[in-house]
Structures are given as C-alpha cells and as structure tokens.
C-alpha cells in the first residue's frame, strides 16, 4: 500500500501485489486550504486524514479505502475547532485499527486540557475522553499516542524541562488514570542539566519507552543519554537504564569516526527507538543542521547508536559516519535515515553519494555487539540531476531481504517508478 502524490493535486491510495503489479488506485482530492495529515492501514481498510482550515474553523476529515476493492468511503468529520485554536491532532494505532482525533484547550501558550475522540477502523465512534492538565503546572507541549487496543498515552516533558511524564488512559470507560513520571534532569556537580530532546514510542512488547538527550542548561553542552521503560501492566512500573555520559573519550570516538575534530556534541537529535525479539533496545540519534539561513542546504551527518540488553543495561555504542546534504525544501524527507529490525540485526538505509555514486546504501548493525557493516550500494536506477528526495521517502521493507524503493529513471521522466530490490 502506498500513498502517492499526484501532479494535478491531491493523492492516490494504491495497492500493488508482491511483483509490483498495480491492483487498484483510488484518488483522494485535496482542495484549497486542505493538507494531508495522516495515513494508515488496518486489516480491512486504509485511512487517510485531511486537515482543512477556513476563515472561522478547522476540521479533520477521515476517509476509508477498502483494501480489497479500493472503494472509497465518504469523508467523515472526526474533529472540529475554531480556526484560531492550536492545530488539531490525530494519531493512528500501529495496526491501523484505531484512530484518535483530538483538540487542545489552552491558556496563553500553556495547554490546559485535550478533548479526544476514539474511532475504530471503520470510523465508528468508540469513546470520548478529556485529558485535564490543570494540576501539571508548566510543561512542554504534550504528544498523544494510541495503542492497538485503544489505550491512550499522553507524553510530556515537565518540571521545567527536567521530567519525563506519561499519563495512561484506558481503552474502556474506566475513569482510572495512571501517571508515571521520572526526573532525568537536575543539578549534577553544580551543573543545571535539562532535557534537550526526548522521544517516546510504544514498541512491540506493548510497553512505552522514552529516551532523552540531556544538556547543560547554561552552556548547551550535551551531558548524557537516559532511557526509561514504562510498564503499565499490573500496578505500573518504571525501569531506568544507567545513563550514558558524553565524556571526552566519547568525543574522541566521534572525531575518529567522522574525521572532524569534535570538541563538543552539537545538533544531535533522537531519531528512532527499536526493539528486537529478545527485547534488546536500540536507540538511534542523528546529527543534522542547517548550513546558514532558512533557505540554506541542510546536512545530516553521523548516527549515534546505542544498544541495551533486555534488562536495560547499556551493552555497546557505535558511531556511523555518513555525509548527506539536501536543499532546505527536501531536507526532512530526502536525507536522514530509515531503519528496521530483523532478528538481531538493525538495517539502516541512507541516501548518499559514496565514491561518486548517488544511491540508497544499506548498513547492518548487530544489535548484540554494535558491529556495523560497510555500506552496501543497492544500485537503484536514479536520475543524475540529484533531485532525490523521493528516493528515501518512499522506501520500505517487505522483509529482511526485500526492499521497495521509488526512482525516477531519467531526467526527462516526470513519472516515478516502483522498484523491488533483493539484497544478499
């Protein structure tokens, strides 16, 4: 299943078989004031969510597409709010069975509550909930995640950017709200340390994981990586991993891997959390930055990869050097990385120019040891004009040895072509 952008405006949901033969294509028009907000796939239907903003109001409209026939259902309004309010939000569960639409109520810049409505994959309303934050004080803007069973997690950075907090709202009508919070910042050796970047993710064991990059509040110097597992089964519990400090020894390793003398970490952001079948956690962060002003090229450099065992103990860390650059308009789709996990191997795809060959490159990282393979060129047929944003953006895995990519075979061609890549 893919969501394809069409030159005439709008999108199309398309389904292909294993040999990339198109089975059907359904057009999703996008009119003035509308933007694509979310796309997901359930067992029976695909879901497309559009955000529409007018002079006085904004709405989220959801559309179902039957997986067998490609038949499109009528657009259904799942949430509405005044145009002046904060942008409406939507979350789709990983298996596509649940859709959660929500709106914010604010006082000044601070969120005071969220009103959410839960739907099944056929867009039948299941429940309405209100998340009340009036007792929270100041906190960073919350994110809302919905699990496959409809359980809702609201994650936030609170206590003046020092605490990772999660609120769990059950899928049933129970009023019970479980709150788990852990301070990861504070004052250490006289240094005020706060959260610079945080990422929360519900992984395949059903637990919610969080990673935080912490930095010295006054100097901006990166201090440590901290990882937390939130387990809401039973009475609810949190497991803390020992922090990973960014010491001078680590900076020396970064310098060696990147070929640049690194005096301090800068512009490093969390990118992905992955979990193996043996419950070993892999955290991936990436360095990316703008060259100058808003319209300047954007660079993506080394990956910082950290491995933890099933008990949350740090096992290894690796630094993967890469060199990517893209125009500002393409930056956050054309560069960066895609990652997937198979057994005890993390596969990482990047779009790079290595030895004058611009292509998709595959690296394998052993989740038990952190050993990184040499980049393998996938030999995707790519036009030589360097307009490559779509190549990485449309890349996905069908399995460990089968990757689906999109290319534009020549500079004269306006069409994109699906490619099936079999790796050794």
Image (tube, rainbow, N blue to C red):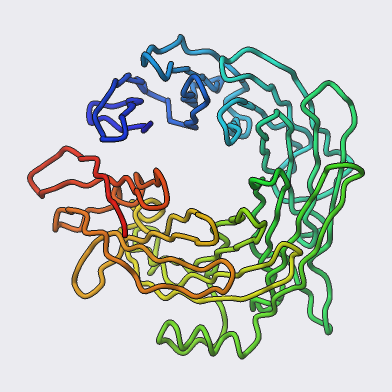
Q: Foreground residue, 422 or 413?
A: 422
Q: Quadrant of residue 18?
A: top left
Left of 115 or right of it: where is 268? left
Measuring 69% from the left and 46% from the top, which residue is drawn there? 205
Measuring 79% from the left and 27% from the top, which residue is drawn there? 130
Measuring 42% from the left and 52% from the top, which residue is drawn there? 400
Q: Quadrant of residue 212?
A: bottom right
Residue 163 position in % (x across, y down): 80, 58
Considering the image in quadrants, where does the N terminus appear? top left
Height in image: 50 above or below 300? above
Q: Residue furthest left?
A: 412
Left of 228 or right of it: where is 251? left
Residue 60 position in % (x across, y down): 54, 22
Q: Foreground residue, 143 or 110?
A: 143
Residue 79 position in % (x across, y down): 61, 20
Measuring 59% from the left and 18% from the top, which residue is drawn there? 78
Q: Foreground residue, 197 or 233?
A: 233
Left of 102 or right of it: where is 31? left
**Residue 11 in view of the camera:** no
Q: Quadrant of residue 136?
A: top right
Height in image: 310 above or below 236? below
Considering the image in quadrants, where does the C terminus appear? bottom left
Residue 112 position in % (x across, y down): 79, 37
Q: Residue furthest top?
A: 74
**Residue 140 in view of the camera:** yes
């Amino acid at each position: 299943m893919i969501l394809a952008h069409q030159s005439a405006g709008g999108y199309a949901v398309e389904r292909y078989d294993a040999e990339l033969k198109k089975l059907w294509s359904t057009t999703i028009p996008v009119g003035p004031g509308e933007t694509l907000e979310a796309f997901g796939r359930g067992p029976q239907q695909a879901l497309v969510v559009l955000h529409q903003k007018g002079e006085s109001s904004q709405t989220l409209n959801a559309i179902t597409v039957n997986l067998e026939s490609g038949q499109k259902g009528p657009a259904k309004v799942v949430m509405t709010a005044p145009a002046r309010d904060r942008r409406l939000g939507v979350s789709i569960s990983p298996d596509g069975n649940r859709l959660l639409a929500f709106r914010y109520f604010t006082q000044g810049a601070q969120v005071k509550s969220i009103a959410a409505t839960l739907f099944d994959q056929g867009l039948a309303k299941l429940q309405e909930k209100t998340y009340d934050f009036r007792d929270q004080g100041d906190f960073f803007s919350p994110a809302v995640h919905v699990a496959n069973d409809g359980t809702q997690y609201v994650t936030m950075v609170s206590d003046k950017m020092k605490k990772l907090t999660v609120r769990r709202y059950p899928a049933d009508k129970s009023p019970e709200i479980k709150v788990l919070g852990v301070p990861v910042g504070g004052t250490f050796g006289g240094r005020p340390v706060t959260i610079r970047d945080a990422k929360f993710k519900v992984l395949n064991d059903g637990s919610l994981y969080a990673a935080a990059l912490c930095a010295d509040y006054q100097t901006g110097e990166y201090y440590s990586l901290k990882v937390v597992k939130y387990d809401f089964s039973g009475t609810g519990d949190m497991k803390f991993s020992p922090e990973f400090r960014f010491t001078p020894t680590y900076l020396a390793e970064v310098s060696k891997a990147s070929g640049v003398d690194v005096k301090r970490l800068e512009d490093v952001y969390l990118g992905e959390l992955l979990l193996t079948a043996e419950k070993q956690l892999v955290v991936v962060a990436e360095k990316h930055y703008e060259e100058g002003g808003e319209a300047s090229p954007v660079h993506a450099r080394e990956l910082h990869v950290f491995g933890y065992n099933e008990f949350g103990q740090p096992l290894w860390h690796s630094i993967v050097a890469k060199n990517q650059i893209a125009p500002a308009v393409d930056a956050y789709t054309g560069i960066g990385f895609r990652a997937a996990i198979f057994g005890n191997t993390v596969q990482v795809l990047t779009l790079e120019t290595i030895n004058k060959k611009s292509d998709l490159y595959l690296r394998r990282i052993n989740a038990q040891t952190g050993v990184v393979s040499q980049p393998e060129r996938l030999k995707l047929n790519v036009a030589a004009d360097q307009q490559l944003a779509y190549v990485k953006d449309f890349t996905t895995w069908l399995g460990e040895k089968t990757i689906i990519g999109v290319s534009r075979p020549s500079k004269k061609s306006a069409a994109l072509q699906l490619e099936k890549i079999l790796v050794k």
